[in-house]
Image: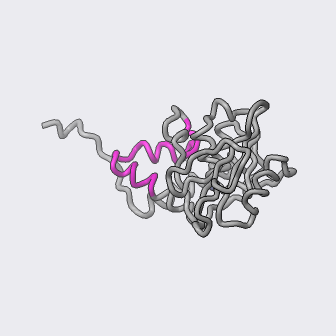
Amino acid sequence: MAGGLRRRFPAYNQTYRDNFIAAVRTNLTALSPTAKAVIHPSDQAARAIVPKNDLNCCAVYAPAVGLPWVAFNQNEWRQADLQFGVGGYNKVSLTTAQLHCEMRMLDFVGQATLAGNYVGISKLCCLPCGAVLALAGVNRRGCHGKGYETGWQYPQWLLNTPGALQAFLGAVAWPMYTDLSPESQRQCLSDLRISFKE
Ligand SMILES: [Zn+2]
């Protein structure tokens, strides 16, 4: 029997979850405070494709050389596929649902390319996207500090880059996360993600 050495995990209950989410939100707000900088030509390019108040969103990255890139998140499928109507761009493919346009751009074009550069977005970043771009070193106009009712999805960069998830969760929530059983860790990240749907 290995019982004496078996690790005891804390119970992942509603109080634990609420404290965890509150700690993460405090960290994300510190990483990406609510702000609105001067609109950039890439923001204007994004808004020319998707209006700022649209349910869909659009991100534009214009490298020094070559065609600019465009990424979408289609929350509103009224238009069959926004990408078909847009010329003059390299297009980031639509993959996971609820992956916001700037997260799609990050995963597809890559953090190494985007770091230190500006990504224009048709609207201000939500709270988790603003924090992810801050951690990735990507410049953007600003963050409105809340989520979107259409939901949020983790970019692969955040989950697959050593240290990125730790920095995203923050000094208080990270040990709360790592203390949990693997099963509760999965539930915990799922609960966090769903909490951004607001
Ligand atoms: Zn977002």
Q: Residue 166 lies in magenta, yes or no?
A: yes
Q: As rendered, which of 48 and 192 lies closer to the eye?
A: 48
Q: Which residue lies most toward the right here?
A: 38
Q: Where 132 sits versus 56, above or below?
A: above
Q: Quick check: 62 left or right of 136?
A: right
Q: How is the image coloured?
A: one colour
Q: Which residue lies most toward the bottom here?
A: 78
Q: Residue 77 lies in magenta, yes or no?
A: no
Q: Quick check: 66 left or right of 176?
A: right
The x, y position of residue 111, in whole percent, is 63, 34
Stretch of the chain drawn in magenta? 164-190
Q: Where 60 sits versus 195, above or below?
A: above
Tell me the quadrant of ligand 1: bottom right
The x, y position of residue 8, in whole percent, is 29, 45
> Residue drawn 43% across and 42% down?
178
Query: What is the magenta segment's predominant secondary structure?
Result: helix
Q: Where 31 sits versus 2, above or below?
A: below
> Residue drawn 46% across and 59% down?
191
Image-quadrant location for residue 7:
top left
> Residue drawn 53% across and 62% down?
195
Could you tell me which quadrant the N terminus lies in? top left
The x, y position of residue 118, in whole percent, is 76, 40
Q: Quick check: 148 left or right of 42?
A: left
> Residue drawn 34% across and 46% down?
181
Could you tell me which quadrant the C terminus lies in? bottom right
The answer to whether any part of residue 61 appears in the image is yes
